[in-house]
Amino acid sequence: MKITHIAIWTNNLEHSRCFYETYFSGKSNEKYVNEKKGFGSYFVTFDGSTSLEIMQRNDITERTETKELIGLAHFTFNVGSKEKVNEMVETFRQDGYRILGEPRLTGDGYYEGIVADPDGNNIEIIA
């Protein structure tokens, strides 16, 4: 058994798709649209197996960022080396994305940096 995909909402479907393709080498399918429901989505696949479904719907437009809530806390990309973690965090910083956690060795043995995607989702980048 394995996780096949995780789904997230966005206010800008094209921007989010481009973000995951550009920074995490994701490969997107063709856009799915259900005009009756005001819904559109892309599946962006990483390394041929796990996907992120990026979804947009006309009636889902707000995100609460004032506190942690029950539900998805973060998702993680393993980039293979400490150097790559450092490089990616710096790239995100230069490109204007929020750095939520500077690269560091964690108590559970990972080397990680944390960034926010365009919609504020926490992404851990680890080695």
Image: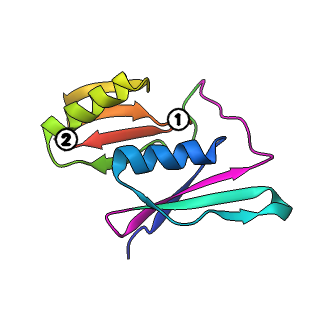
Q: Check disc 1 and give the amino acid type.
A: Pro
Q: Which quarter shows the N terminus?
A: bottom left
- Structural crowding at the residue carrying mark 2, measured as other residues with C-alpha within 10 Å and reported as few (<14), some (14–19) or many (≥20): some
Residue drawn 53% across and 35% down? 118
Front residue of 28 and 54: 28
The residue wearing badge 1 is: 118
Q: How many marks?
A: 2
Q: Is residue 118 in the magenta section?
A: no
Q: Nearer the viewer, mark 2 or mark 1?
A: 1
Residue drawn 39% across and 56% down? 26
Magenta stretch in the rendered image: 46-66
The x and y percentages for residue 68 are 54, 32
Front residue of 43 and 115: 43
CB within 8 Å, label 2 to label 1: no
Residue drawn 22% across and 37% down? 85
The residue wearing badge 2 is: 110
Per the image, label 1 sits on a secondary structure element best described as loop
Single out the residue that lies furthest toward the right. 36
Sequence-first tag of 2 and 1: 2
Apparent side of residue 16 relative to residue 74 in the rendered image (left or right): right
The x and y percentages for residue 65 are 59, 28
Apparent side of residue 118 relative to residue 48 in the rendered image (left or right): right
Q: Can residue 106 be seen in this view?
A: no
Residue drawn 68% across and 50% down? 56
Give the Cα separation between the discs numbered 2 and 1: 24 Å
Apparent side of residue 77 relative to residue 51 in the rendered image (left or right): left
Q: In the figure, residue 63 lies in which quadrant?
A: top right
Q: Can residue 111 be seen in this view?
A: yes
The x and y percentages for residue 100 are 39, 25
Q: Is residue 58 in the magenta section?
A: yes
- Structural crowding at the residue carrying mark 1, measured as other residues with C-alpha within 10 Å and reported as few (<14), some (14–19) or many (≥20): some
Per the image, label 2 sits on a secondary structure element best described as loop
